[in-house]
Amino acid sequence: MTQSLSALTLLVRDYDEAIAFFVGTLGFELLENTSLDATKRWVRVRPPGRAVGSGPSLLLARAATPDQRAKIGDQAGGRVFLFLETDDLWRDYERWRAKGVRFLEEPREESYGIVVVFQDLYGNRWDLIQPRAAAESTTTWRVRPARQADRDFILGLVPRLAAGFPLPSWRTPEEVVEAESATLDAALRATAASGEVLVAESSAGIPGGFVYLEQHLDYFRKNAHAHVSVLAVAVEAEGQGVGRLLLEAAEAWAREQGLGMLTLNVFVGNDRARAVYERIGFAPETVRYVKTWEM
């Protein structure tokens, strides 16, 4: 015997406003929108990228009685009602937040992947989940010193340092990439001040990210501390703990140098990176303000 769940009912106030949210805002596919009578329609939507029959669709059902209307937005009694899996949580989080979708927390890492809770237009709670890649369970990562052979990989990741978040209006991606490339080129050629470039490498020998570390002098105490000058993770290695592993290696490097503090800079608009850093123990200190004018 073979059975499958074909659809789930979601109570809505109005068909068109529900379609506008799920299709227009979230990017779902409109599978069916058929009039049954003067007031009733058969409306089904589903997340994008799903093959026909690979999972249940969402049936948008207009509430028709007082009891049904009372349940709009509260079909699970305040608990998470639906669980939506994605191949890129940060992409969806940033896109939907820009469109006004209400998130109840910052994305967080769990044993099963990255998750964040959001509400639909009626208040129902959803889990947006990026599961850990199936291959992750068999992929192990290690951190080693960079080699000259890593040069193309490291410089190839530099454009990611200016992408995926809004830069200040007076900065351009081109100047960020140019400056970071020059810094890393000098470090790889060993012409920079004392520091270390570390690379995260998979058990198959494939690099997944890097971190460039330097020693800086603390402005207030006048003693040396470790500083993360540049850190980047390849798209293919995201969600596998590579960034955390590199930061743990950075802290270990700092301790080996006899240093008691690790710092880093991040663009104020890079909410994704800031959330990650704060989640693993970094805290904001000073905030740099900038005023520019024509010259």
Image: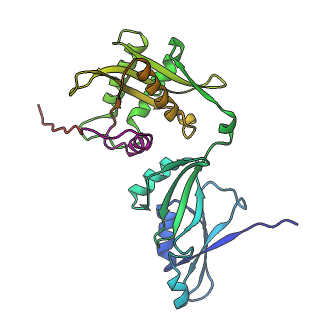
Q: Is residue 248 above or below residue 19?
A: above
Q: Is residue 193 above or below residue 58?
A: above
Left/right placement of residue 87 relative to residue 204 reads left
Look at the image and say whether residue 283 sits in the magenta stretch.
Answer: yes
What is the x, y in percent for residue 210? 48, 25
Residue drawn at (12%, 36%), measured in percent from left and top? 293
What is the x, y in percent for residue 120? 48, 67
Q: Is 133 or 39 nearer to us in this picture?
A: 133
Magenta range is: 267-286
- Colour theme: rainbow
Q: Is 178 or 258 nearer to us in this picture?
A: 258
What is the x, y in percent for residue 4? 77, 66
Q: Is residue 17 above or below residue 243?
A: below
Left/right placement of residue 259 relative to residue 208 reads left
Left/right placement of residue 138 relative to residue 286 reads right
Q: Is 295 or 100 nearer to us in this picture?
A: 100
Q: Quadrant of residue 2?
A: bottom right
What is the x, y in percent for residue 121? 46, 70
